Image (cartoon, rainbow, N blue to C red):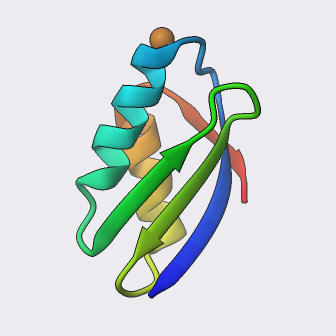
Amino acid sequence: MSTASYTVTGMTCAHCVAAVTEEVGALPGVTSVEVDLGSGALTVTSDAPVDDAAVAAAVDEAGYALAGR
Ligand SMILES: [Cu+2]
């Protein structure tokens, strides 16, 4: 079990949260995704550590950007 935290920029509403949750949640091995709209905090729980680049790509696919981790 592995947990990683990131910050997502550009989210403005619950739909944004849903889009990020869906894209990141689709990554292999990811078991749980938590997104806080107010702070942009993204917490990813997975069976094994997920590549930061893969998380960044998923967030980008959703239409947002990773500010860092
Ligand atoms: Cu939105």
Q: Is residue 30 left or right of residue 35?
A: left
Which of the 4 image quarters holds residue 5? bottom right
Q: Is residue 23 left or right of residue 37?
A: left
Which of the 4 image quarters holds residue 22? top left
Q: Where 40 falls versus 33 (above or below)?
A: above
Q: Quadrant of the N terminus?
A: bottom left
Q: Where 12 falls versus 65 (above or below)?
A: above
Question: x and y percent of residue 18 in the render?
Answer: 37, 28
The residue at 63%/21% (across/down) is 10
Which of the 4 image quarters holds residue 63? top left
Question: x and y percent of residue 59 in the render?
Answer: 45, 41
The residue at 30%/53% (across/down) is 25
Q: What is the number of callouts on the image?
A: 0
The residue at 35%/35% (across/down) is 61
Q: Is residue 1 left or right of residue 22?
A: right
The residue at 38%/41% (across/down) is 21
Q: Where 67 falls versus 64 (above or below)?
A: below
Question: x and y percent of residue 37 in the render?
Answer: 63, 27
Q: Nearer the viewer, residue 10 or 21?
A: 21
Q: Quadrant of the C terminus?
A: bottom right
Q: Is residue 22 left or right of residue 66?
A: left
Q: Which of 59 and 41 is in front in this view?
A: 41
